[in-house]
Image (tube, rainbow, N blue to C red):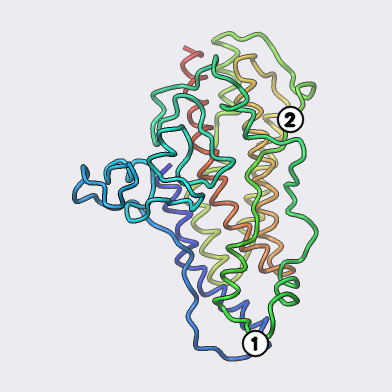
Amino acid sequence: YMSRRVVIGILILLIISVLGGIAALLLYNARTKEDVLPIPTFSPLPVSDPTADTDNDGLSNGDEKIWGTNPADGDTDKDGYMDGEEVQNSHNPTIASPNDKLPVGFKPNQNTTPLNPAAPTTTSFDSYFSDSVDVTGGNKNLTQEYGRTIPDKDKSPVTLNAYIANQPIVTNLPVLNNTAIQTEASSPTNIAEYIRVAGNLEPISDRARLTIALNDFFKSHDTYGFSTFADSVTSFQTNVKNIPVPEDAIQYHKLIIGYTELLTVTFKQIVNYPNDQVKALVAIRQLDAIDRQYYPLLLQEQERLLSLSQ
């Protein structure tokens, strides 16, 4: 998981050049000497004093590294709650509330404690889904909206960066109706067969491929890598939808179908960069957020199912 976050972090280093290019377009070739403010980020670094709590947020520097939080910022996700307080109350300190509730037994970067099947579903699972979620991101052209809402005299890479950072992103998953799931009784054999197909996450988590797609996008605005990624995720989702689902795997099944649905739309928004540059960059933010929130849960659910397939 941490290596995936490092890959996603590449976008932070490269996004400045893209923002500058879009700003130039929106400013009708006006010249500016302002630097683009970097989107706040951080990377896991060696901890010199793991027992100290540099930012007094209730998490030691060592725990900050484990959770992926910023040891110099007490509220990493800027939602008004200290990182230590969020961890103490089973909330993700890197995802802003209200959609940051962690399942019972969740351990960052570990899968040693499976999800508790007896845990209340309203807080440990169902809260990740919404009946009314619009995964498309809406019909607004955000590039045109920026052009209309920001006065020409204020247009700059700085204001563009702030505009992108303030746009809402979708983190709830669409709900998969139970009638769309072909269920079967759970047995070690059935679960193992299901995981053989649905547990192969390479089509949606190929780190090397994602690195190439990000580099091509930020260096030359080439979206081909994300287009092929979207095709791979769609194909994977189709295969998973068409297999019987053991009763013990229903939770994982809903999670993987909802996640791939949102992931595909996010990739397609990036691919639509030529028509809406701003929305494509908002989609990059969304990609980072949903990767942080759902990929660890998928791995944890996988671990639970593997233990049942023995």
Q: Quadrant of the N terminus?
A: top left
Element at badge 2?
loop
Looking at numbered disc 2 in the image, what kind of residue is underneath it? Leu
Q: Position of residue 23 (x, y in %)?
A: 61, 79
Depth check: 192 or 107 in front?
107
The residue sitting at 70% across, 73% down in the picture is 146
The residue sitting at 52% across, 75% down in the picture is 17
**Residue denoted by label 1:** 153
The number of numbered badges drawn on the structure is 2
Query: Considering only vertical position in the picture, is 301 above or below 61?
Result: above
Label 1 packing within 10 angstroms: few (<14), some (14-19), many (20+): few
The residue sitting at 26% across, 52% down in the picture is 54
Looking at numbered disc 1 in the image, what kind of residue is underneath it? Lys
Q: Position of residue 125 (x, y in %)?
A: 60, 27
Label 2 packing within 10 angstroms: few (<14), some (14-19), many (20+): some
The residue sitting at 40% across, 47% down in the picture is 3
Left or right? Give the position of 161 relative to 40: right
Query: Considering only vertical position in the picture, is 73 above or below 31?
Result: above
Query: Considering only vertical position in the picture, is 73 above or below 121?
Result: below
Element at badge 1?
helix
Query: Considering only vertical position in the picture, is 118 above or below 232?
Result: above
In the rendered structure, which disc, 1 or 2, sits on the residue that comes first in sequence?
1
**Residue denoted by label 2:** 176
Left or right? Give the position of 213 relative to 253: left
Instruction: For marks 1 and 2, give the CA distance.
Output: 47 Å
Nearer to us of marks 1 and 2 is 1
